[in-house]
Structure formats: C-alpha cells, structure tokens
Image (cartoon, grey):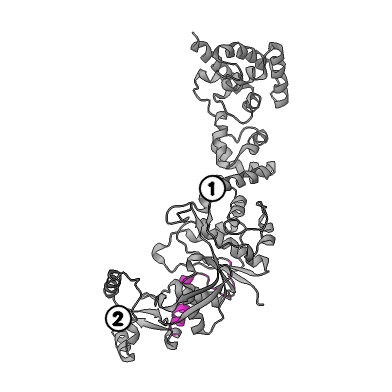
C-alpha cells in the first residue's frame, strides 16, 4: 500500500468553521494513525468570496490546535504550489487534455441563453441541467468563434445514459444515474477552474490517497470519477462525513453566522476541549470514554467509528467538557491561560495563586473570570437589603454590631494571610456566641457589595488586603448607620 496521504482544502472565505475544523481533524488523525502525510491546500479560485487575512486564520488555527501539516502553502512541499490560484496553468492544461479526449467541450453560451433555458426548465417543474447545446458545434464553428475572441467555458461531457457507482468508506455503495449529473463548468471564462476540475487534478497530482470531506459531495462524486477515468488515473478512497447540525432542523453554517473556532476561543473555551468535543461529532471510540488528548485520539481513531447520522453541536456538552479541562490544568498553566481575563478584570496585581485556588474548580469558561473578580476593583453601590439572609438569621440591624466588632478586630490584625484571618474571625465568632454565617455573611456583603464571590469573607479580605478591607468596611458601616437613622 502506498503512503496514506490526506488533505484539508478550505476556502479562505472567513474564519475556520467548526465543521471545517472537524474535517481537518479527521483527515489529520487518519494520516497520523497510518503513518501518512497531511497536506493543506487552499482553494481560493472563488475570488469574489475571499476574505482578506483568511489564509492566515487557517494557518494559525491549525497550528494552534496542534494539527500541523506536512505540506502546505507556508511550509512548502514537493507538489506545490498549494494555493489553487497559483496553479491556473495546470488546470488549463488538464482541461484542454479533457477536450482532446472528448470528456469535455467548449461552451460559448451566453448568460442570457442559459437563464432562458433554466427558466423554461423550471416552468416545466424540472431540475435544470445544461442541454449540451455546444457539444454539437463543428470544429470549424468552434475555431471561428475562437478566432473572433468569443468568451467560452469548458464543460464536462457526462453521458446521459447509464449509472455511475462508487464505494464510500462511511456510506457504502453509492449509485447515481448519469442523467442526474450536469455538464458542469470545469474551466471558467477567466481561465480559473471550478471545484469540479481543481479538486480532481490537485488530489491526483498531490498523491492524495484518501479524500475526507463533507457529505454534501456524496452525490456529486460520480462526476469526479468520470474525470479520473477520462485521465486514466486511480480513484482515491472516499470518506464522506455526516453533517454537523445546529439542532434537529438546521445545519451549523458559517454563512448563517454560526460560531467559528475563534469565536469559541474568545468565549473562554480551551482549544484542547474544543478539539476533543469536535472529534466526537460523528465519531465514536466504541466505549463510554469522552475525554481524549490529541495523542490519545490518534490511537483511538478509526473509520469504523464514523457515523452516517448527523451530529448535533451541543454547546452545553462542550461547556461541560471545557470545565473538565479547566479543572485538570496545573495551577501555573491555569494562571497562564487565564491571564488575559485577569488583566481584563484588573486582578493581575492580586494574589493569583489564591484566586486560582478559589475559581479554577468553579469555572466552566475562562470568560467567566472578569465577572467573578469584579468585586476586587469595583465596590458596587449595594442595597442594605443584601444583609438579610433567612438561613443565617441576619439582617441590616443585626449586622451593624457584628461589623463594628469585626472592624475592631481587623484594625488590630497585622497578619492578613488566609490562615491568620480565618483563625482570628472564627475566634471572634466564638467570643460573640454566634454562628459563623452571622459574622461572615455580613462581612462578605460589607467588603464586596455582592452575595456571590469566589470563596467567602475571609478569602475576600485576604485578597483585598488590610487597607482596602478597612476602607470598604468603614464605608459599609456608615451606610448601615445612615440607612437605619
């Protein structure tokens, strides 16, 4: 068996969509599992849809996720160029070869004629296919038009009778009547190829052995096989992947603004969690296991695990998985990953080790960090009703004398470490003969202005330090006194 060679061939039309990333992942996993090569090719012949900077997004995303490619536009390789717009002469030469073989022909039909024919067909309730009008042109007529400089395209010449069958590794035998296959354009009037020609020529010339792509190409693959046979080339193994759905009715779609890889990263998802989750969208390891590193996915991946059924992108499941990955990070790694969010919260000057201990076990996404830490830099103007807690049996009136005692203690406290503060405040609870919550709940409200913080009053005071804790406590005591006047 020849070396396995797979490819990922995205169009630079925006950010890398989740469905596209899954295709890249499966192609990469299959190549690595079989000791093969993974190739990146950029399909940029649709110049009108190309987005500036999109190529760099593709390169960076693949590197960021660990899906390093062996050959590609920016790393080179023996079968370049790896950008289709740089291969125009190759396509033109092969299109002419097909014309000489009778597998393609020049078409001079105007846009107006094509539109009229399409309208007639639709009026009859039929699916439009080109009527082979230009196939019957004589050599003399063709040459006359060429000499006159008439624009033309090159169309594939597909027989109208019979059937074409091929075997897909996921969906099995696929048979399509040739009458259902249109004589699609292979080479446009501007000399650029369509996908129909370029994917076949490139896959052959680049030695691709296994074509892994979306199920939307399942029914059109027979026309590509007609080209392979016309050239006398070996047909690759096809592996078509089921659709990724937004829900039971709608496909996940870049055109409809559904989330890209970058969108999820910006929302605080870890790249490892995203890759792990995407791997399970249409593939099963054959067990209940769900958490896999990239290296473990290589070992576990097999074509037998691919499903024919559509996969629904479940954000809640992804979020659960992301939480598992966050909690599994070492403290140092967590702080490194979370640093942009610490900076956004203005928390980078505080004790990050303590913050990590408090919030890492409670996070589902990293972008939750600024909200959880906002109390450190912003004391909100809270309502004294927050002191009321039925379970703790506290309210604004009972909180005031307790806070005055706490103030006296915290003013005399020299050691603001977590252990020392906890010991001193618990001693005050015993001295006052109250429950822990009857001191710590009012104190949390008084120094943070909110009911929910990572940890409790002790941790908040430790993070804020003596000066800021007392400043806020004094302001809160004054607020209570004024509120009860």
Locate residue 97, reporting x and y percent. 45, 85
Q: Nearer the viewer, residue 20 or 15?
A: 20
Numbered marks: total: 2
Q: Is residue 12 above or below residue 197?
A: above
Q: Which residue is mark 2?
A: 150
Snapshot quadrant of residue 250: bottom left
Question: In this orientation, which residue lies closer to the viewer: 237 or 104?
Answer: 237
What residue appears at the point 53 percent right and 62 percent down from the top-left corner? 242
Q: Secondary structure at mark 1?
A: helix
Can residue 87 be seen from the camera position used here? no
Q: What span is in magenta?
A: 75-96
As drawn, which residue projects farthest toward the bottom?
140
As measured in the structure, the alpha-carbon distance from the residue carrying label 2 to the one carrying label 1 is 53 Å
- Residue 217 has which mark? none
Q: Position of residue 285 (x, y in %)?
A: 66, 58
Using the rendered view, name the quadrant where residue 126 is placed.
Answer: bottom left
Identify the residue at horizontal 44%, vertical 52% (top origin): 257
* Mark toward the viewer: 2 or 1: 1
Lower sequence index among marks 2 and 1: 2
Q: Nearer the viewer, residue 171 or 41?
A: 171
Identify whether 420 is placed above or below 360: above
Q: Is residue 436 part of the magenta span, yes or no?
A: no
Which residue does the image show at 64% across and 12% down from the upper left?
405
Label placed on residue 315: 1
Local packing at callout 1 (Cα closer than 10 Å; few below 14, some 14-19, many 20+) is few
Binning the other alpha carbons within 10 Å of mark 2 as few (below 14), some (14 to 19) or many (20 upward) gives few
């Amino acid at each position: 068996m020849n070396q396995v060679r797979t490819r990922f061939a995205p169009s630079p039309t925006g950010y890398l969509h989740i469905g596209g990333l899954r295709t890249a992942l499966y192609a990469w996993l299959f190549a690595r599992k079989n000791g093969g090569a993974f190739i990146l090719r950029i399909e940029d012949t649709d110049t009108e849809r190309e987005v500036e900077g999109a190529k760099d997004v593709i390169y960076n995303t693949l590197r960021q996720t660990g899906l390093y490619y062996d050959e590609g536009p920016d790393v080179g390789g023996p079968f370049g160029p790896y950008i289709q717009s740089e291969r125009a002469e190759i396509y033109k030469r092969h299109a002419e070869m097909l014309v000489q073989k009778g597998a393609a022909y020049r078409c001079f039909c105007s846009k107006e004629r094509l539109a009229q024919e399409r309208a007639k067909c639709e009026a009859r309730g039929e699916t439009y296919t080109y009527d082979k009008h230009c196939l019957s042109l004589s050599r003399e007529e063709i040459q006359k038009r060429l000499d006159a400089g008439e624009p033309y395209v090159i169309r594939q010449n597909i027989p109208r009778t019979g059937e074409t069958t091929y075997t897909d590794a996921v969906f099995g035998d696929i048979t399509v009547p040739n009458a259902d296959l249109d004589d699609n354009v292979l080479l446009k009037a501007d000399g650029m190829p369509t996908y129909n020609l370029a994917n076949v020529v490139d896959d052959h010339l680049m030695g691709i052995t296994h074509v892994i792509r979306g199920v939307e190409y399942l029914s059109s693959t027979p026309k590509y096989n007609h080209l392979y046979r016309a050239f006398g080339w070996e047909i690759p193994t096809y592996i078509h992947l089921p659709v990724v759905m937004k829900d039971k009715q709608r496909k996940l779609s870049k055109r409809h603004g559904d989330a890209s890889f970058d969108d999820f990263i910006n929302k605080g998802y870890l790249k490892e969690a995203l890759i792990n989750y995407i791997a399970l969208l249409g593939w099963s390891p054959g067990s209940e296991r769900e958490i896999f590193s990239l290296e473990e996915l290589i070992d576990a991946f097999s074509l037998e695990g691919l499903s024919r059924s559509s996969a629904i992108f479940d954000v809640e499941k992804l979020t659960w998985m992301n939480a598992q990955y966050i909690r599994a990070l070492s403290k140092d790694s967590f702080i490194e990953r979370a640093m942009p969010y610490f900076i956004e919260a203005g928390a980078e000057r505080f004790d990050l080790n303590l913050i990590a201990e408090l919030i890492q076990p409670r996070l589902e996404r990293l972008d939750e960090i600024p909200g959880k830490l906002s109390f450190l830099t912003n004391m909100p103007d809270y309502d004294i009703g927050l002191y009321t807690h039925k379970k703790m049996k506290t309210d604004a009136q009972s909180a005031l004398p307790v806070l005055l005692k706490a103030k006296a203690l915290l003013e005399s406290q020299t050691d603001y470490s977590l252990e020392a503060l906890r010991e001193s405040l618990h001693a005050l609870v015993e001295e006052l003969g109250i429950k822990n919550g009857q001191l710590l709940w009012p104190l949390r409200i008084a120094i943070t202005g909110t009911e929910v913080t990572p940890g409790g009053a002790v941790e908040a005071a430790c993070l804020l330090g003596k000066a800021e804790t007392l400043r806020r406590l004094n302001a809160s005591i004054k607020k209570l006194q004024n509120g009860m006047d």
